[in-house]
Structure formats: structure tokens, C-alpha cells
Amino acid sequence: MSESGDWQPPAPGGGSGPPDESARSGKPPPVPASPAARPPSAPVAPAPTPGRAGGPPVGPTPPPGPALPTWYAPPPTTGTDGFAIAALVLGILSFIPVAIPAAVIFGVLALRRIRRRGGGGRGLAIAGLAAAAGWGLLIAAIVVLAIVSGPIPDEPGTAPPPATTAVDSGTSAADLVVGDCFVDFGQETAIGIPRVEVVPCNEPHHVEVIAAFALPEGEYPGDDRVKALAEVGCEQRMPPKLADARRNLELSFLYPLESRWVLGEREVLCVLSSNDTLTAPLPQ
């Protein structure tokens, strides 16, 4: 128990804190100021509301899209490449020399485009290149062959042999007459008649004209009929003295084709040829 005479009872509510100053002085405690008596504070502006005047604009929120990779490649091309089709067409037309380089260019470009972008037509491009190469080799071979096999000039100081009969050497066989001898049948003319080199019958030869006759007038009866008439006529006109020597001789004939028939040609020439060299006229 304290000996001090100014002891005060504890504050209401209990507690052991120090005694209030108002209690010591005997004055009533101060009353807190009411809210109306407080000094006014600075007004605070409200936060702007989106969509209202003065606030940020409001728009539709885009949906979240798929995540893109760090790199992007275009989708592969589908269908047949146009350059490949052009290469094939130009390769087929490469028999025209100017189309060969064009086919090669389009073929190479098509293969590069297909390898880079995808798509069809690789086989067409390769076929166009192959066709262009084939035509190029063929044209080159023809040019080389034409240069190599060009006309051979005649040797200086030579001259063609003089004609020995009424028919010049190298004349059409249609102009032969009975008794003419020639070495052999030569190259045919544009209308199918061979050219021959006539020689005197006492010089080496293989063929001699033994007979001639004309076919009947009328329309052209056809190749088979004309051949049959010519063969029968020549057999009938075989000289009797040649019957025994026939085994060493071959009977043949020259007859008019339709192109000469319409011009009035009807004559058939009967000739005897031998594999052996003849140096005299055949006996009649």
C-alpha cells in the first residue's frame, strides 16, 4: 500500500496506465472536434471511367490468336507448273531451231521453281529438255552430214566422154530405140523412168534393146494390166536365135506409167540383160 495521499482510482475499463492529466488537474477532458468543425480538405477528382467523356476509348477486345512460329514459309504450290508445260511444248516444236534455247530456258526455270515451291510438272520439264536435246543433236548431225557429203568438184583437166550414138549419155530410157546398148540402168527420173548411159554395142555393156511395140489405145487399164500386156508382147518378140542363149540372159521391159499414158505414151521397150559383160550385139 502506497503512503502517498493523492491516490486516484484506476480509469474506467481497467488498466494500469498512467493517470490522465485532466484527472490530476480536476478539469474535464477535452471534447474531440466534430466532423463539421474540421477544416475543409482539397477535393479529389474521381478516376476517369472508360467509355465516358475524358476516359480512354473503349473498343472490342480481339480474341487471342494462335501463336505464330518464329519463321514462316509460304504454303506449297499445287497443280502443274506453267513453265514445265511451256518447256514440253517448245521441246516438241524444237525441229524449229529457234525453239531449242527457249525449251532449255523454260525447262531449267521450271525445275528450279518446282524444287523451291513444290507442285507438279517435273516430268514434263525433263521431257521438254530431252526433246530439245534430241532435236538439237539431229539437226547438228544433218548439218555435219550435209557439209561432209557436199558436191565433189571435178578434177581439173577432165571432160565428160563424148556421145557415141544418137542418144546422149544420161538420157531418159524412154528415148531408146531397138539396137541400143547401154551399161546398166541408172538413177530414175522424177516420173519413174531410169536414165542410161548408151555405149556402142562393140564396147563392154550389159543391156541391149531387142524389140519395141505399142499398147492398144484407150483408158489406162492399171499397172497390173499394163505389166501383163508388156510381158506377153516381149515374150512373143524374142528373136529365135536367142532361144538357146536365154539361160544366160534376163528379159525385162520398160512400160509407160499412168503419168505418161495420159500424155499419149504407149510404147513398150523389150530389153535383154546379162550378168556377163557383152562386147558384141546380140544375134537377131
Image (cartoon, rainbow, N blue to C red):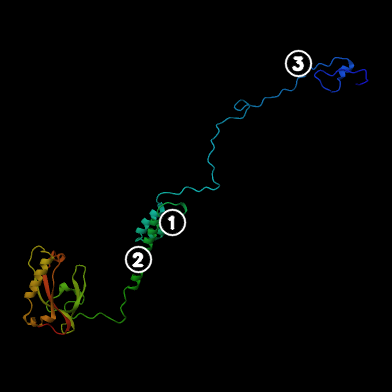
What residue did someone put label 2 on? 138
Q: Which quadrant of the rendered structure holds the C terminus? A: bottom left
Alpha-carbon span between mark 3 and mark 2: 116 Å
Which percent across, then down, holds residue 9? 86, 17
* Badge 2 density bin: few <14, some 14–19, many ≥20, Cα 10 Å: few
* Badge 1 density bin: few <14, some 14–19, many ≥20, Cα 10 Å: many
- What amino acid is at disc 2? Leu
What residue did someone put label 1 on? 111
Q: Residue at x 41, y 53 (%)?
A: 83
What residue did someone put label 3 on? 36
Classify residue 108 by image quadrant.
Answer: bottom left
116 left or right of 261? right
Judged from the image, the secondary structure of the residue bearing numbered disc 1 is: helix
Q: Residue at x 7, y 72 (%)?
A: 233
Query: Do the CB atoms of the residues marked 2 and 1 lie less than 8 Å apart?
Result: no
Q: Is residue 274 above or below residue 83?
A: below
- What amino acid is at disc 1? Leu
Q: Is residue 93 above or below residue 24?
A: below
Residue toward you, 101 or 70 = 70
Mark 1, mark 3: which one is toward the viewer?
A: 3
**In terms of sequence position, does the residue under pointer 3 or pointer 2 come before the other?**
3
